[in-house]
Amino acid sequence: MANVDNGVIQFTCEHCKISLTVDDFLAGVSAPCPSCGKSTKAPDQRVKGGAADVFSGLKPQKKMIRPPVGQRLEQDRDWDTGQPRKRPPQVVSETQREREEVAVVTKILVLGVIVLLGVLAAAYYANQAFNS
């Protein structure tokens, strides 16, 4: 007897009676048993109900609209807990990170030069006004 649950099939080898677990996409596939080495077949429980059962539980898809600012889309939430999904950190290459750092340093230097020129111009005009 096979038990299909959460994407896995649990069944017993018909030769040595050991309990086996395989992913459900291997349903109906024959392979050697890891214990006895004889060919055993994972039961195919997916086709018993027929195609009508596969589509009977489907709901019509809602039209996708943009959520208000600050709200998360349903796909950004974990299905089981309803909590916001934790996103994996974005992988950035070292070259890209170095380019971003150079861009920031360049912006700071340009801003510093502009401020310095402003201070020098103000000092020049103040000196001209004082000497006149």
Image (cartoon, grey):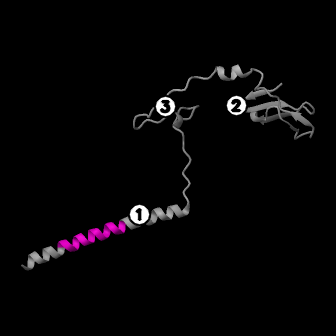
- For label 3, count other residues whose C-alpha is less than 10 Å away and answer few (under 14), some (14-19) or many (20+): few
Q: Is residue 48 above or below residue 82?
A: above
Q: Report helix, strand or loop for mark 2.
A: loop
Please name the predominant secondary structure of the magenta segment in the image.
helix
Pointer 3 residue = 64
Residue 86: where, in percent of width, then height?
54, 42
The residue under the point 56% across, 60% down is: 93
The reply to whether the C-beta atoms of the residues labelled 1 and 3 are less than 8 Å apart is no
- Quarter of the image for residue 59 reads top right
Magenta stretch in the rendered image: 108-122
Q: Amino acid at mark 1?
A: Val
Q: Amino acid at mark 3?
A: Met
Residue pictured at 27% horizontal, 68% vertical: 115
- The image shows residue 111 at horizontal and vertical percentages of 32, 66
Q: Which mark is residue 130?
A: none
Residue found 75% across the figure and 33% down from its top: 24
Q: Which of the two labelled residues, at mark 1 and mark 3, occupies the earlier sequence position?
A: 3
Pick the front one: 11 or 97: 97
Q: Secondary structure at mark 3?
A: loop
Residue bearing mark 2: 6
Task: Find the distance from the CA under tag 1 to the CA under tag 3.
Answer: 38 Å
Task: Assess whether mark 1 and mark 2 are in contact (beta carbons under 8 angstroms).
Answer: no
Q: Nearer the viewer, mark 2 or mark 3?
A: 3
**Magenta stretch contains residue 121:** yes
Looking at the image, residue 28 sits to the left or right of residue 39; the answer is: left
Q: Which residue is mark 1?
A: 104
Sequence-wise first label, 2 or 3: 2
Provide the secondary structure element on which disc 1 rests.
Answer: helix
Label 1: how many residues lie within 10 Å, few (<14), some (14-19) or many (20+)? few
Picture coordinates of residue 119, whole percent (x, y):
22, 71
